[in-house]
Image (cartoon, coloured by chain):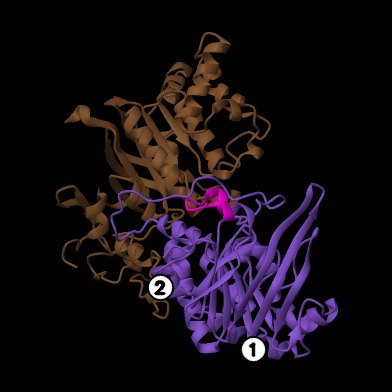
Chain colours: A purple, B brown
Amino acid sequence: MLMKVTDLKTHFFTTRGVVRGVDGVTFTLGKGEVLGLAGESGCGKSTLGYSLMRLVPPPGRIVEGSIQLGDLELTSMDESTFRREIRWKRISMIFQGAMNALNPVYTIGYQMMEPFKYHTEISEEDARERIARQLELVGLDPEITSRYPHELSGGMKQRVMIAMSLLLHPDLVIADEPTTALDVIVQAQIINLLKKLKKELVLSLIFITHDLSILAEISDRIAVMYAGKMIEIGDSKRIYEDPKHPYTQKLLSAIPKVHEKVERLEFIPGAPPNLANPPAGCRFHPRCPYATKICMEKEPERTVLDGSREVFCHNIPG
Amino acid sequence: MMEDIELRVEGLKKYFPIKRSIKSVLKREPPRFVKAVDEISFQIRKKQIFALVGESGCGKTTTGKLIMKLMEPTEGKIFLRGQDVSHLKSKEENLKYRKMVQMIYQDPFSSINPRFRVYDVLEEPLIIHRIGESRAEREEMIYHALELVRLTPPEEFVSRFPHMLSGGQRQRVAIARTMILNPEFVVADEPVSMLDVSIRAEILELLRKLRDDLGLTYLYITHDLSTARYFSDWIGVMYLGRIVEMGEVDRVIDNPLHPYTRALLEAVPEPEPDRKDVIKSIPIRGEVPSAVNIPEGCRFHPRCIYAKEGVCNTSHPKMTELEKDHHAECHFAGKI
C-alpha cells in the first residue's frame, strides 16, 4: 500500500460559516494503481486532491484525519519538511487547465528547471539532461525547452505539465481534470500517454474528473464523491457494471453514449446541497428516489460488499 | 420540399484579415487571412436539430455567429425560410431578424448580468423588442416563460439574482430568455458543456420538448459527439473551416465515411471499464494546422492515414452524397 487516508476533513472557514469541502473521507491507494475520483462540481474532489498535496487555499485547512504515505504521517509534518521531502518529490500534481498553469513569460525550460532548484542539489547540466529525458518520455521534442507557452498547442502544454509532474520521480501523481479543456482527439492521446507512463514507471495516480466516461478508460478503482463524502468506492469494472449506490447508478445512466442510440437519458433532479449547511442524515436523500425515513435521520455507515467494495447507503438495492 | 427548409446556408465564408506590419505593407506582401469558415453549405429542415461538431478552432462557433448576424460573412448566402438574410441593412430588419433567431450561450455564469434579477433578465428582450403593452402583460409573459423551462413556481424565481441559482437553473433562465420572444430558430452554442453530466440530459430534454411544443428548429453547436448523437437529427462534422461529412445522425455515427470523423469517433471515451489497460489507436497523425496556412488539396491530407500522393495533396475533394442523407468530402469515401 502506498497511501492510506483516514477520516480526512478539510473545512473552509468563511465569513458565512464553515463549508465542509471534504468531510470524513477514507480510502487507500496501492502502488501502481489508478484511482478515479468522480463527482459533480463542488463535491469536494478537487479539495481532496489539494489536501493530499497540502495546498488547500485559505480559509480552508485540514481539520481532522490522517494521510499516511508509507510510514510517514503527512498531516502533522511541519511545512518545511513537507515542502522539502514530499511535495513534488513524492506527491506531485497535474493542475486543471494546462493553458493557465504555465507562466507565459518564462520559457518551458526555465519553468521545468524550478523544481530542481528548490528540491534537489543536482547540477544544472544534470537537470537539463533529466528534463530532456522526461520530455521525450511524454512524446515531446526536448528542443521545446527554449519555447514559450504560447508557442505550444494545448496538447503540448498538457504534456509539458505531465513531464513536469514526473521530474522528481514521485510515487503518486494527482491529476485534477487533466483533459477537461482539451479536444477529444488530444484528450485520447493524453489518456494513452498516462496509461503508458503508469505501466512503465509503476506510477500511482489519482485521476480527478466529473466525466465518468474518461475514468472508465484508465481507472483500476473508482471512488464516487457526493457533498464532501465518499459514497461508493471499489473495483472499476464492478462499479460500472453493477453500481450499488443510487447516486452512482443515476450518474452512470446520465451519460450519453456515442455508439449506442439512447432514446431517453436519466438525470438527477435538483442540485447538490450547500456544503455550509448539508442536509441531515444521508446527504443524497433530497435527490434520492429510494429515500426512506431513516435516510433523513441517520448518516449511512459503510457497507462492505464482496470483500472490496464499500457503499454508504441505508437501502442498498439488490 | 422547399417550404420544408427552415435555414439554408450557401457557400458561406468568413475570413479574418491578419494585422500586417508596416514592413510587409511596404514590401507589398499580399494580405493574409485566417480562414475561419471556408465555404460551407448546409440546410436545416423545419423542427430539426442540426448538430455542428468539431474541435476547437474548426469554425463552428463562427458559423453560429454568422447565422446570428453578429458578423457579416465574407462571401456566401444565408436564407431563412427562403428569404435572403445574408446582409441586413436597416435597423428594423435587424431587429426583426433577432426576434426570429435567438441564441443560447455556453456559459450561464457569464451570459446573464449578475446585477439583474431573473425578472429583469427576462423583461429586457421584451423591452428591446417593444413587446407587451403594460407591465402586467409583460409579467404574465415572464411567468409563462419560466413555467415553460420548468422553473416553478415562477413567483419563487423572479426576484432571485443569478448567484442564487444553480448552474442548471441559470441555464434554464437563459433558455427562458431566448424563448420569451417566441423565436423560430435557435442557435445553441454548447448549451450543456459547462454543466454537470448529471443535469445535462435534463437540459437537452427540455430543449427537445420546447422544440416539439413550439415547433422550433435548432442549430446545436458542440464538440461532444455523444450529446450530438443523443440530441440531434442531422450532424455536420467540421474540420478547419469546412464541413467534411454531413448527414442523418445515425448514419454518420454508425458508418462514418470520412477518415476525420472516424478518428473523432475512435477518440470519444466510453464508460466501458474493459478498455482500461488498452492503449487506444487513434487513426490520425499530427496536429491541426493553423487556419492561416490551409494545406493544398484536401485540407485533411497531412493528418490522414489513407492520404495518397498525387491525389489528396493536389486536388480538392467534392462533397458527394454516398448514400441517402449521407454526404462526405473525401476522394476515397466509401472505398476505405
To which chain does the residue with label 2 belong?
B
Q: Which residue is the site of mark 1?
A: A129
Residue drawn where x is 48% and y is 18% of the image: B91
Q: What stretch is highlighted in magenta?
A: A284-294
Camera-side residue of B43 and A132: B43
Which residue is disc 2 drawn over? B273
Q: Are marks 2 and 1 on the same chain?
A: no
Amino acid beneath label 1: Glu
Q: Quadrant of residue A68?
A: bottom right
For marks 2 and 1, give the one nearer the viewer: 2
* Total residue callouts: 2
Q: Residue A52 carries which label?
A: none
**In the rendered view, would you say A241 is above or below A272?**
below
Which element carries disc 2, helix, strand or loop?
helix
Image x and y of residue B87, in percent: 39, 27
Residue that sits furthest to the top in the current view:
B133
Distance in Å between CA atoms under marks 2 and 1: 38 Å
Viewer-proximal residue among B123 and A112: B123
Q: Position of residue B107 (x, y in %)?
A: 55, 44
Q: In this view, does B227 lie to the left or right of B123?
A: left
Q: Is residue A178 magenta?
A: no
Q: Do the residues labelled 2 and 1 touch (CB within 8 Å)?
A: no
Query: In the orientation shown, which residue stands out farthest toward the front?
Result: A293
How crowded pointer 2 is (Cα within 10 Å; few <14, some 14-19, many 20+) is rated as many
**Nearer the observer, B185 or B204:** B204
For label 1, count other residues whose C-alpha is less than 10 Å away and answer few (under 14), some (14-19) or many (20+): few
